[in-house]
Image (cartoon, grey):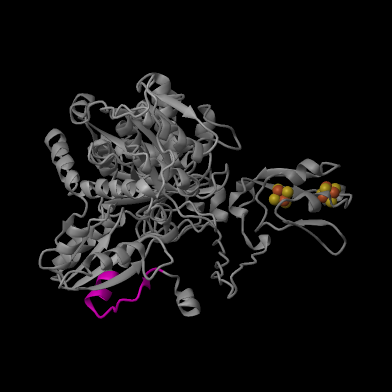
Amino acid sequence: MTREVLSGNYAQAYAVRLARARVISAYPITPQTTIVEKLSEFVASGELDARFVEVESEHSALQVVVSAAGLGARTYTATSSQGLLLMHELLHWASGMRAPIVMGVVNRAVAPPWNIGADHTDTIAQRDTGWLQFYPESNQEVLDTVLEAYRLAESPEVRLPAMVNEDAFYLSHTYEPVDVPTPEIVDRFLPPRESHAVLRPGVAARLGSFTGPDHYVEFRHELARATEAVGKRLPEVEEEYRRFTGRSHGGAFPTYRAEGADAVLVTMGTTSTTARTVVDEMRAEGLKVGLAKLRMFRPFPDDAVRELAGSVDRLGVVDRSYTFGPAGAAATEVRAAIYPTPHHPLVAGFLAGVGGRDVTPAHVRRMFEELLGNPGEATRWEDLLPAEVGAHG
Amino acid sequence: MIEIRFHGRGGQGAVVASELLAQAAFLDGREPQCFPFFGVERRGAPVTAYARIDDRPVGVRTSIVNPDVVVVLDPGLLATTPVCDGLKDGGLLLVNSPRPVERLAAPDSVRRAAVDATAIAVAHGLGSRTMPIVNTTVLGALARASGAVSLEALGRAIDRFVPSHPEANRAAASDGFASVRCVDAGVPSSAPPTAWAPTAPLVLPDGPIATVPSRSIRTAAWRTLTPSIDLARCTRCNFCWKYCPDDAVELDARGYPVIALDSCKGCGICAQVCPPKTIAMVATEETAP
Ligand code: SF4
Ligand code: SF4
């Protein structure tokens, strides 16, 4: 193991090199570009034995890796924002063709207006495409999660593609120390992909051909079962990773000081780091607050959410994206998950950090204070400019 | 924890400066967290970068609004950007400037430091006179003025992570370290106070479509070169008025051009198209107060 100062994007590229991906294809887009720039350097210098396929769009990039995955290769691509939206059609092909691709997505606001700041709308809009989705909070977690994602995605009972997301700038361009495992360790944790390839020279076969109502339902049901298998497989993969590296990140829905808490805030991505510091400050003042992190948004960790909800009376869910539904995406899912349970905590929805706006310790503290008071369940735009609250609130 | 905010322009190396500072602080055995924010990636556009250095992992992921140290890589930004916003009392303002440090416009409550990083960088062959790459020189000065990082670690970080001319960059950092000049907080500044037109709060229209005239977008902060017109030779052909992409050329009552400096981004197109070549592009720092 070495300890190096890496950006989130380089942590992602280092992980892909350690995973020995064989086919990489991508189209540049800020703030993702430095991931594939670094990977193309690794390929050019021979440090990574892979084909780097240059293409004319994100749509083509994903098609290249879908096809290569169909032939049994370990594959990687990366994108952001509008680039991910352009991939939308192929996202369904990737999951439906059971291609265990890993894709880095640097979460960036969707235009208009043009904005390259952190915002989860791009990936949240893809929540129904059958991809696993991880939202790490540190560069270390980015590197570790890419390696875990390959292991998980390639598990025979899963075989689904996975996105490992990074908040733009707060991770993608942030340099901080990261432990980089040795290739020998990673080779033992993540051996070459066992090929379940359908496509082989000399064997007549098809992926994604026509299916009528007679079998289409079963294909979708298979996808549902594969998705359910993730919940069981992730803890096993994390445990294996911990055995090799000494690190794990708490599964799909890790909690922090949530035992006996009067109010728990549910966060995604980098907001979690700031919120953890605020939890410590408020606990030191005698306020019983805690944190839970939606590390994985797809599949949604219903069981873990229900377990937490059984012991807390007030949950605040922070979404870094605006969706056009009854509440923020995560707030909606949390409510749906706990609906069948007997104990229903109050669930308050907060929108914060949209379009790269800072989620400061003061913002987090205010959310906790509102939650400990009497927030009601309406969604709050936590950080609107003061003038705008009056004008449009 | 020490919190540092950098103000520079795309192409000057502010982004690399924050990365190098992180690498150097790590070599000093500390826990850094450094990152830039930028909008349009255009040479000359203002860039802000942040650095936190602590003895344990940094537990906050936001930009820095109350820095201990502000570093200004381009003196021209002093005229267009309120760089001292939020700077703590007793904090440090470090500016790349050839001026005497007493002449830096800054609140009396902060320590001030100046280093002529442009001259040092040019002397070491780093960048050009109009676009010098001053980051390593300024980091050397920062090491001395703030103690945030050691010069020795900075030198090692340069050797490892600066791909071109590491020797010249290391020498420039040493010169920056040796030549930075400081004055303590409490010493009054002899500079005329910079009169900041307070930024009017943005009022969004009630309708769904915002009609923001391009003149209200202040691109002045992008300007490294400023057009200067010799009206004695101007023929009032109005080419400059027609070609300016930012609508920054106005005409006075007699038809002579007047540059609206709030909007002029310094692209130099007016100087290019002027038939008698009466428009000269001069370095913005020389036009700053
Ligand atoms: S330099 Fe000349 S053309 Fe360019 S923005 Fe300024 S006034 Fe307009
Ligand atoms: S282009 Fe030159 S000559 Fe023509 S109006 Fe402008 S400054 Fe005068």
Q: Is residue B134 left or right of residue B205?
A: left
Magenta region includes residue B21:
no
Q: Nearer the viewer, residue A176 or B231?
A: A176
> Where's residue A374, x and y in %?
25, 80
What stretch of residues is rendered in magenta? A366-383
Q: Which picture quadrant has residue A355?
A: bottom left
Q: Nearer the viewer, residue A360 or B273?
A: A360
How many numbered discs sit on the rendered protein?
0
> Where's residue A9, x and y in %?
37, 39
Say if residue B181 shows up in the picture: no
Quadrant, the N terminus of chain A = top left
> Where's residue A57, x and y in %?
53, 38
Which residue appears farthest toward the front when viewing the image?
A214
Q: Nearer the viewer, residue B240 or A385?
A: A385
> Where's residue A124, x and y in %?
38, 55
Say if residue B80 shows up in the picture: yes
Q: Is residue B131 left or right of residue A339?
A: right
Q: Is residue A100 above or below residue A45?
A: below
Q: Is residue A357 left or right of residue B78?
A: left
Identify the residue at image location x=22%, y=40%. A157
Q: Is residue A151 left or right of residue B75?
A: left
Identify the residue at image location x=17%, y=47%. A232
Quadrant, the C terminus of chain A = bottom left
Identify the residue at image location x=86%, y=47%. B233
Q: Which picture quadrant has residue A348?
A: bottom left
Q: Nearer the viewer, residue B269 or B3?
A: B269
